[in-house]
Amino acid sequence: MPVEQWLEWTRGPLFRFALAVMVLGLIRLVVLNGINLISLVRHSYDKKMPVGVVARDTLRWLFPFTRVPASQRFFTLVSVAFHLCIIIVPIFLAGHILLWQRGLGLSWPAMHQTLADYMTLFAIATGLLLFGKRVSTHLTRSLSRVQDYLLPLIIVTTFASGYLAVHPAVNPAGYDATMLVHALSGDLVLILIPFSKLSHMLLLPISHLVSELGWHLVPEAGTRVARALGKEGEPV
Amino acid sequence: MATAMPADVRPAEQEQGEEQDIEPAVKRVPPQAGQQPNYSFYVEPFKLEERPRRFLEAFAAILRQSNYGPVLDTYCRVGAKCSVCTASCPVYQVTHDPSDIPCNRSELLLKVYRRYFTLAGNLKSRLFDYFRLTNEHINTLTESVWRCTACKRCKYSCPMGIDHALVTHLARWILAEIGIVPKALVVSVRQQLEGQTHNTSGIPVPALKDTCEFLEEELEEVYPGAGISFPFDVEGCEYVFFPAVSDYLMEADTLMGNAAMLHATGTSWTIGTGNFDGIDYGLFYSDAMWERIIKAQVAEVHRLGGKSMLIGECGHASRSAKEGMAYFIPPEDQVPVVNIMELAYEKFRAGQLILIPDAIEERTTYHDPCNIARKGWIIEQPRAILRHICQDFVEMEPHGCDNYCCGGGGGMVSIDEIREFRTLVGGKTKAEQIKATGAHYVVTPCANCKKQIDEVIKDHGLPQVRTGLHDLMLKAIVLPNGQEPILQEEED
Ligand code: SF4
Ligand code: SF4
């Protein structure tokens, strides 16, 4: 199959498949977490949802100036910039919106192309910085799993190939091949979202909520555990 | 503190924990088959057979009966491994040992959860045989969760809000169910729940009354003729008083300050002879014990027809009572839980507690106990009082809800055999903070922090004097008739 056909395939059926996987996967996570949250409040006396606290703790991360240890401030800012870029650019890029319009007739205002270019470069730079940080110290390596190395690289690949595809002047490879890499890696990211730590894009506030509700301990749980383990009435 | 056992009570066959080398973390000699592992703290003999199986049974039972499953589920999914939390953990900051990274500590339990309680983990293990729970893993987990002071600093620096203190809390409960608990804690809880005296220090009621009589005599010297007393078993009071019982043994000035404040403000309060210990070590290792202890305390409040539980100067006692009340006591039986500093502040602000301004000349600083400060519950109240009575009040950096743990949190302070770890590792940052203030007094309103900071000061050779809030207030409280305290000589 020639490259153009592959490209059509990655932008057509594969993209729709990836999108479906992402949406269904996220819906699954919402349902599972919804059940979890309900069970968290159902068993405890305290049924209040600490919404205010959770909103504050979650949003604090968009403005990482307070409660972030000074030594982590630089990379926290880098990380926030990275996150903002990789969320905003794919959604508001004129080229992407065009695809939506052609495929589903959906459309929304696009961002300025120059801004998109700068944000793309910024995403690549911050992504590489974060990757560099991860590989550079014993501490971060000791924490990292395979996905922690691969995900930033896949995301950087998507952005780099996207940038090259629309800037032929700096592109050493051909348009089609570059675009193919872009579309393939982009689809891969979508597919990975619900199955990797990327799911935190949805689970972030839920995680904060769970940390609060997790402390709503269940009355009589201790007694029932003792009964289940055949230790009822045993001395301390 | 309460659990400090005289050396001769310690079982001879248990050796002192190995020499503490700080970097890297303690490596232990693997135990011979059939021999109890040599943990860094004393553990009463526990059953050695089939520990992994029994661990998993206990884990399964706890997951079924409690709320922890959904929490672990979420944490397994969102852990970003971003390392931000490393900069906030006082233990990792000193040891720089990867196993002390909060995210790695929690991973020890999450790994077991993933393998045995999730579908994906189950499948993965069938295909690749990737992880199996072993005795060694249980030993590693044990050491690890008893190196965390459950101070929750990491929770507030984790973008995902992962609460490692909650994971530590759960892991300790599972371990307790198979008999692995620091002996110091379990002995105290046994004394409190099953002993004759119903308190962790084993103080009989006649001895308690003697102590209080003695304190009344001392108070008579500070406020002659005022008749400040420690009322026992008065029914229908506003407040039933639960200090950490160790205060009766070691913190005379705190208790005298408490009584003087309550007297000066005309508060109706009493000590119940059925249960007068605010300590609840269940918070540190078992929800089952936490629940039994808070229930016994609340029963005493109801026996006396009291309206609220008044907790003395103690962080963990305050939190375990306040949260325990909300979690374990049916709403119809709940009573408000008030920390004595909240009460003092309220009376001070309402003009019912008169304090001599600038009564304390020496520079004074304040250490926030994690259990009352981290979530912002009690931060400003004691400071308002201190700024009023001290000429030179200075802060440690950071303080308030970002404070550093004293190093004795999470029940660690009661474990005497890990003192070196507590003061030289867990308490190192605190020592530096205290030193930097150049203060004379370090005020801390918590029985745990008091003992730990005493030891930190000693082991780091610092010149500071540790005290409680009410100890200082005792030099500043003016009785309603205008009587001022006659200052006593400071013995040190
Ligand atoms: S709770 Fe405190 S001691 Fe424990 S891991 Fe977190 S920061 Fe470290
Ligand atoms: S800050 Fe949170 S997500 Fe990041 S390494 Fe620590 S626990 Fe993991």
Image (cartoon, rainbow, N blue to C red):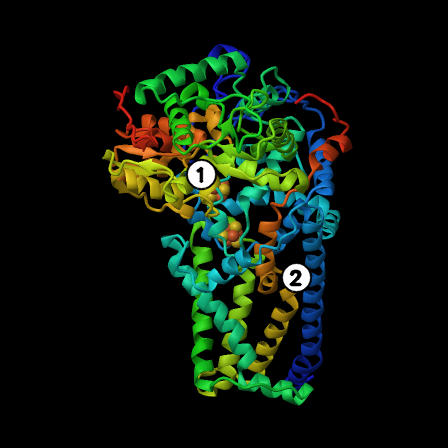
**Residue toward you, B402 or A171:** B402
Which label sits in the foreground, 1 or 2?
A: 1
Disc number at residue A133?
Answer: none
**Amino acid type of the residue that numbered disc 1 sits on in the rendered structure:** Leu
Left/right of residue B232 with respect to residue B48 in the rendered view: left
* Residue B83 location (% of width, % of height): 47, 52
Q: Which residue is mark 2?
A: A195
User: Residue B491 location in percent, x, y?
Assistant: 28, 19
Kindly identify which chain the residue marked by label 1 belongs to. B
Residue that mark 1 sits on: B343
Q: Is residue B16 left or right of residue B117?
A: left
Question: In screen coordinates, is B457 left or right of B282?
Answer: left
Secondary-structure class at tag 2 = helix
Q: Quadrant of residue A198?
A: bottom right
Q: Nearer the viewer, residue B441 or B4?
A: B441
Residue under the point 44% across and 68% down: A81
Q: Quadrant of the C terminus of chain B?
A: top left
Picture quadrant where residue B257 is located? top left
Label 1 CA crowd tier, 10 Å (few <14, some 14–19, many 20+): some
Where is residue B350? Give x, y as percent. 39, 44
- Amino acid type of the residue tagged 2 in the rendering: Phe
Can you say whether B312 is above or below A97 in the image?
above
Task: Tell me, yes or no, whether the two marked residues, 1 and 2, touch with CB atoms within 8 Å.
Answer: no
Asked whether residue A201 is in view, the answer is yes
Q: Is residue B98 visible?
A: no
Q: Position of residue B251 (x, y in %)?
A: 40, 23
How far, Cα to Cα, is label 1 from label 2? Answer: 51 Å
Which of the pair B110/A164 is nearer the observer?
B110
